[in-house]
Amino acid sequence: MSLPEVFIGLDVGGANVKTVKLRVRGGSIKVEDIARVYNPLWISGKESLERVLKELKNSFLQTSKSYVISTCMTAELSDVFEDKQAGVYHVVNTVEKVFQDALHKFYVSTDAMLIDAKTAIQNYLSVAAANWAASAWLLEKIAGERGFRNIVFVDIGSTTTTIIPVVNGKTIVRGRTDPEKLVFGELVYTGALRTNVCAIVDRVPYKGLWARVSSERFALSGDVHLALGFIKSEDYTTETADNRGKSLGEAVARLSRVPCADSKMLTMQEVVEIARYIYEAQVFKVFEALIQIRSWLASIGADLDSFVIMVAGVGKHLALEASRRAGFKQFVDVDDVIGEKISPVLPAYAAALMALDRVAASEVHSS
């Protein structure tokens, strides 16, 4: 029996749905399509997930009748759901409904295993926020195939930062759930696009003095990175704080409101210095987590100089800067290692590969 040709990886978040389509043909694996759909569930409603998945299915599977789908998720944390159990139930049921004709439907668990829908719903915490586990599975694969034995993976997306240590080719995380990972420094709730500026700083430089910031949602981290030239307008894929555009001028106008001023009270140069201060504070948040990880690695006798920092995500520039300051000396972009531009959708890519690995192994055993 031959392998299915198409493997779909889904990463269902509360703000974004990321999808990767792999095509297997003649022993080769090709990334045929990638999609990132911004769909904030707290705005569009939980029922919008079905519409988004149907649109993705129509786009990705027009000519593919034989396919396998593998899903990881973080959407269950969204407050559109009563609790995580309700969130997992909704995501799983929606995937099962939309992709009912798939040959296999898998869900990534926090122990980097693939389980079925019934098991996922019964053991909902095993799949809640398990996208990091998909990445961890891929990191171990990279460690074994590419010779990176000791890795600290730093993935900074639009909303959060994920840090995964790999020692001697094996993932050695201490946290499994989001609260545990926040405690152990493996999750930092800061990202390159969606983080409210007042969650990063409580004051900013203002005309040679310090001004306390407003706690309003006046500006986001995307405005900071855009103002400093780290991202382009097209990289700013989420909504803005004021629902206006994503030009440099509009980003600067939003940032000027953080100290309750405006673009007439502050010059472009003054606002750029405000952005620079916010950026430094955000770097420090990731730096702190990396120092916590380094401290733990040192306590178990790991050789810190042997670790390679592997960066991913729209905030990879932030990851690199924080890692340098934390004392790491070796750096690599995950895209350069894998040879595909999959950095912003890495968990979805990993989930698809996990499904391919699982189905291929089953075919070998059954033959």
Image: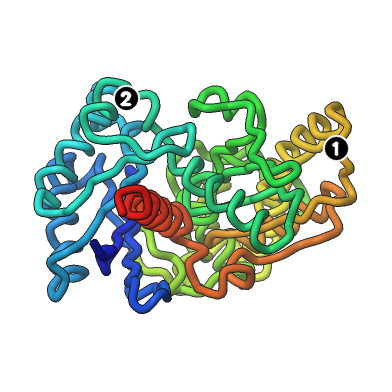
Marks 2 and 1 close (CB-CB < 8 Å): no
Q: Which residue is mark 2?
A: 124
Q: Which residue is mark 1?
A: 302
Residue 329 is situated, as x and y percent measured from the top left of the image, at 86, 58
| CA–CA distance in space, label 2 to label 1 | 34 Å
State the quadrant of the N terminus.
bottom left
Residue 230 is situated, as x and y percent measured from the top left of the image, at 61, 69
- With 292 as the anchor, is 161 left or right in this view? left
Q: Residue at x 81, y 34 (%)?
A: 297
Residue closest to the far bottom: 26
Q: Nearer the viewer, residue 203 or 128?
A: 128
**Residue 241 visible in the picture:** no
Classify residue 189 by image quadrant. top right
Residue closest to the far front: 367
Residue 192 is situated, as x and y percent measured from the top left of the image, at 54, 55
Q: Residue at x 58, y 27 (%)?
A: 175
Q: Is residue 120 above or below residue 94?
A: above
**Residue 4 visible in the picture:** yes
* Picture disc at residue 83: none
Q: Residue at x 42, y 54 (%)?
A: 357
Q: Residue at x 32, y 60 (%)?
A: 19
